[in-house]
Image: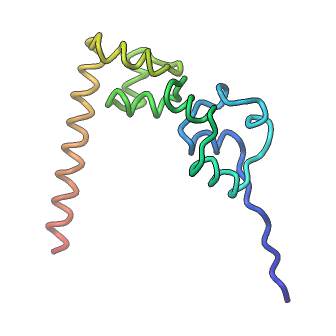
Amino acid sequence: MKSHQSTQTMKPATAAKKLGVYLPATPAEFQEGVVSRAEFNELQTNPPQWLQDLRRNGPHPRPVVAARLGVSIAGLARGGVTEPLTTEQIEALREEQPEWLEKERATQAEVRKEAARIKEKKQGQES
């Protein structure tokens, strides 16, 4: 009996999320098709110009915006940022340092510190 392997594919939204790009900003042919595992791997290892430009200049999806600003996605929403931002807009926010951004960065730092403390405590119990 011969095993038949089917080609794994993913929806454009899934591929865009994994590539860290905003789907509506991608080319129409990317949005309308399906992406095979081989095509996805090729996009990662040898990104076309449109993908390089999107990663560099945006617009960026919320997880990327949050990471670049050093806050959580919920923190973005609390700060009133609900739309994708370009790299230029992210840099402008960094320079402005609005009060909500400072507060959310401090909150995020506390969350990370607490997570590290819990992890350390867990490791100490396992020893």
* Badge count: 0
Q: Judge left or right: residue 44 versus residue 37.
A: left
Q: Is residue 53 above or below residue 16?
A: above
**Residue 56 percent across, percent down from the top left:** 49, 29
Q: Position of residue 48 (x, y in %)?
A: 64, 39
Residue positioned 24% across, 30% down in the render: 107
Please tell me which residue lies in front, 103 or 45. Answer: 45
Residue 54 occupies which quadrant of the picture? Answer: top right
Please determine whether, in this image, residue 41 is positioned above or below residue 63: below
Q: Which residue is pictured at 19% across the width and 66% down the height?
A: 123
User: Which image quadrant: the N terminus?
Assistant: bottom right
User: In the image, is 8 to the left or to the right of 52?
Assistant: right
> Of 7 and 121, which appears nearest the observer?
7
**Residue drawn at x 56%, y 29% as measured from the top left:** 53
Q: Give the side of residue 19 with respect to residue 126, left or right.
A: right
**Residue 108's x, y, as percent?**
27, 33
**Identity of the residue furthest to the bottom in this view:** 1
| Residue that appears at 62% across and 39% down | 16
Looking at the image, residue 126 lies above or below residue 34: below
Quarter location, residue 41? bottom right
Q: How is the image coloured?
A: rainbow
Query: Considering depth in this image, is 118 or 109 the residue closer to the camera?
Result: 109
Q: Quadrant of the C terminus?
A: bottom left
* Residue 113 in the image, given as x and y percentages of width and height: 19, 43
Seen in the picture, residue 79 relative to 11 is either above or below; the reply is above
